[in-house]
Image (cartoon, rainbow, N blue to C red):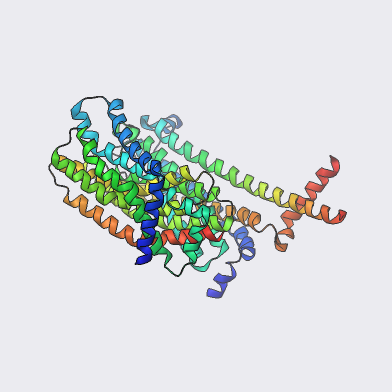
Amino acid sequence: MSAFVAIVKRDLTLALRRKNEVITSVFFFVVVAALFPLGIGPEMNTLRLVAPGILWVGALLASMLSLSRMFATDYADGTLEQMALSPNSLSLLVAAKILAHWLLSGLPLVLLAPILGLQFDLSANALWVLTLSLLLGTPVLSLIGAVGASLTLGVRGGDVLLSLLVLPLYVPALVFGAGAVQAEISGLGASAHLSVLAALVLVAAVFSPWASAASLRIALES
Amino acid sequence: MIQKLFFYASPQNFYPLAGKLWPVFACLATGLTVWGLWLGMFVAPTDFQQGQGYRIIFVHVPASWMSMVIYLAMAFWALLGLTFNTRLSGMMTKALAPTGAICAFLSLWTGALWGKPMWGTWWVWDARLTSELILFFLYLGHIALTSAIDDPRRADKAGGILALVGALNVPVIYFSVKWWNTLHQGASVSLTKGSSMAQVMLEAMLIMGIAFWMYAVAMALYRVRSIILVRERHTQWVAELPEVRAQMIKNTAGGANA
Amino acid sequence: MIWNSWSEFWAMGGYGLYVWGSFGATALCVALEVIWVKNARAQALTQISNELVAETNSKEWS
């Protein structure tokens, strides 16, 4: 357990020393949320309709931007190899890195979303569901993204390749996340969607660290 | 029996086997295609609702089926490869991927061509077509990943993990897209007409389905032979192959003439 | 036989563009894929034979 906490603390410390990386992906979310209305038009009824999708896709893309950072720096300076060789389970250490990634990339989006949602004239209930759906959904994005990041570690053109790999796998989270907000808006209630999202988090939390660790070992042995 | 299977796990032993088998599958594919198309285009009657346009199902449905079957086959070989650490499994996965991607593309293309006269638009976000689109992206991602990694063993294993993760996700994706579609009151059309199809239509469709399958197997076997040649090019048995020797003679003859 | 004439066959009851567009695309993809795999094999054989020839040449001269 202490190894887990140590890795989380380490990743957070390292990232906060290079704050601009964290801030850039948050800033990306803000800009995207502002750009869409500029592209679509100021008609509030339209914006209210498209808001759940736009905000969710914006959060998804912002979260995806920072994925390659998850393992790249540690791979470059050899720390990843040390982690793999250590007596601690690599899956546990990877889970710690994923948690750190979520704290840095996912959580700020969750906290920002209600404010951005106001730009789209979402009701208070809808904003609450949006926050909750992102709170459940962004960990899924970090977890699935970790598998992609570990598969493309050190590969030429890795960033774009990572997006291509990971976006199809993001679809269920997107469907249920944005769908939750839409269900709330249309009065159907979001509990079903949120339950499925919660299930996705649990399943991903179990499988992703293991799959990522396996992929990391493959990347390290070559 | 298991001994036999492990015998063919060696690329050296599998190469001649694949060489003998692919023409068989190619012939089966051709024969079944001729039979299926004859049944479908010349025997099956006009559809009551869709007129002659329904005949697209004779390529659309087989292509969709194969895009899914091939993906499952890739996942199967990936699982074998990761479990037994066999080189050939990775080569088979690599050999299957392009055919699968082409089938997924054809499924989308023919689906659009079917949709335009039937529903009025080239694209419809119904659950099956959307899932097919995502499956196409999964194929492209797999091909991109395995091509981008230089080390073939790492490419095999990474591709294997991706194929497995993708295969496990496909039901989840399909379910979520189905949910997404029904809630949004999409066009509730079924692309296959279910059991209300005339017997001949169903027969022709199934025959075409098997024809596509035979074709996919033939392609995969032929392709894996080239992959084996390139991967195993530093071995003695490849250097002694008649086709390699023939090519070498052609090369030196060409060089001498230059 | 359900067609009264060849022109009826090609017209496909008005759906000709879509039906033949589908079958044509399929035939084209099959043809292209067959050419592609044949090329891949030829390339593989050329690459291997070139390497082997270069190897034997370098052995002769050393």
Q: Is residue B45 left or right of residue A117?
A: right
Q: Residue at x 36, y 47 (%)?
A: B201
Visible in this render: residue A69?
Answer: yes
Is residue B207 among what the camera can see? no
- x 51%, y 61%: residue: A81
For the point 49% across and 58% down, which residue is it?
A79
Q: Where is residue A31 shown, x and y percent of the image?
A: 32, 33
To which quarter of the image does residue C21 belong?
A: top left
Q: Is residue B56 left or right of residue B49?
A: right
Position of A9 compared to A116: left or right? right
Rendered-image quadrant of the N terminus of chain A: bottom left
Q: Tell me where residue B216 appears, x and y as whole percent.
A: 50, 52
How far across and down, in percent of the image, does residue B96 sit?
51, 53
Front one among B7 and B30 = B7
Front one among B224 and A16? A16
Residue C62 vertical placement versus C24 (above, below)? below
> A106 left or right of B64?
left
Q: Quadrant of residue A147?
A: bottom left
For the C terminus of chain A, the quadrant is: bottom right
Image coords of residue A158 (percent x, y): 49, 46
